[in-house]
Image: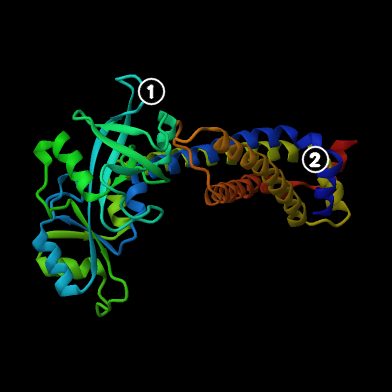
Amino acid sequence: MKLALRELLRRPGRFVTATVILTLIAVLLMFLGGLLDGLIRNSTGAVEAQDADALVFSDTSQASFLRSRIEPETRTTIETELGVETGGLGVVLLGARVPGNGPRDLANVAVWGYELAPSGVPAPPGPGEAWADEVLEADGVSVGDRLLVGPARIPVTVVGWVENTSYNGQAGLWTGVDTWRSVLTANRPDAALDTGVFQSLVIRRGDRDLGGVSVPDAVESLFDGEVVALTVREAIEEIPGVTEQRGTFNQILGVTVVIALVVIALFFALLTVERTALYGVLKAIGARSRTIFAGLVVQAVVVTLVASAVAGLAVVVLDLVIPPGSIPLSISATRIITSVVLLLVAAVIGCAFSLRRVLKVDPASALGSSQ
């Protein structure tokens, strides 16, 4: 292994081609992973932000906010029987006219009405006001702007920013319940809700002991199938398109890792062929095949780590340069670490294809062929 590291230091040019190719593959892998995380966040951020032990939907809604209706009697029963805290929640998806933009240059918004503040969102603002997701900055929105929401052009004033609260690809506008009802009634009269009716309920257990029963199970047991109670994670998985997006991108990421494996396998297979005489000498003086193979693995790991470091720096710079809201890119330390681990596994497996050739090196034959 010392010999392998010494070769890396003294003859780095031999490994430049593999390092450059692996760097490009690593950038692609991390960028695609960040794109997947960004797309998922844009679809699920508002739900993921909910500080809740359960979200309650009507049984026929298929866990969709837009189709769900929770009556006041349902809420009263949950609070009385379980002694938990509840908060109404609802959303309407619309376009908003931004001051200074063209009449057809609309910003896509998800207008939320809430009683219990999600993580990262302050308490409900005053009438006609909203906390806006920062991705709306890409649409030219600024704090203090008066947005005209929906075909009815209901005025909503932006009073501050929140982040990572988009839903279904549309930026979150977090309003008080009365403002949300006004926007919903004016723009979607067919979906208007009576006072006290919400699309969903946020349930917080707090210190309440439910006898070891989960909050979703405890809620559903009260209504004999008339409501559906889900954890936040379960509610996220029910959002249309989330599972399909994740599956498609994971397949692409898998193919990218396989390409990295093939590149490493081919490079070190060729390197092994070039070194046949050298390996013969090493074996003639007592070196074992496993020692030689360990040197190959060390070189592959070092090359992969160098490529991953350069790629990680490149995607972080990309994430900082790209304006919020333009491309749904979300680069996280977890995504970078996961990509590096996958590339290292590919490097080790790729080197394994050279093991057979190393084992077959015969000192006498190798020395004879080198003369």
Residue 262 visible? The answer is no
Q: Nearer the viewer, residue 229 or 352?
A: 229
The residue at 21%/68% (across/down) is 217
Report the number of numbered marks: 2
x and y percentages locating residue 237 in the rendered image: 30, 51
> Residue 119: which numbered mark, if any?
none
Q: From the image, state whether disc 1 or disc 2 is nearer to you.
A: 1
| Mark 2 nearby-residue class (10 Å; few <14, some 14–19, many ≥20) | some
Name the residue that disc number 2 marks.
Answer: 275
Name the residue that disc number 1 marks.
Answer: 100
Which SS class for mark 1?
Answer: loop
Q: Is residue 259 above or below residue 202?
A: above
Residue 348 visible? The answer is yes
x and y percentages locating residue 362 in the rendered image: 79, 47
Q: Is residue 139 above or below residue 30?
A: above
| Visual colour scheme | rainbow
Q: CA distance from mark 1 to mark 2?
A: 67 Å
Q: Amino acid at mark 2?
A: Arg
The residue at 62%/44% (across/down) is 350
Which SS class for mark 2?
Answer: loop
x and y percentages locating residue 109 in the rendered image: 31, 36
Q: Amino acid at mark 1?
A: Gly
Quadrant location of the N terminus in the rendered image: bottom right
The residue at 33%/42% (across/down) is 172
Using the rendered view, name the quadrant where residue 250 is placed: top left
Q: Nearer the viewer, residue 44 or 266?
A: 44
x and y percentages locating residue 347 in the rendered image: 63, 46
Using the rendered view, name the quadrant where residue 80 is placed: bottom left
Quadrant location of the C terminus in the rendered image: top right
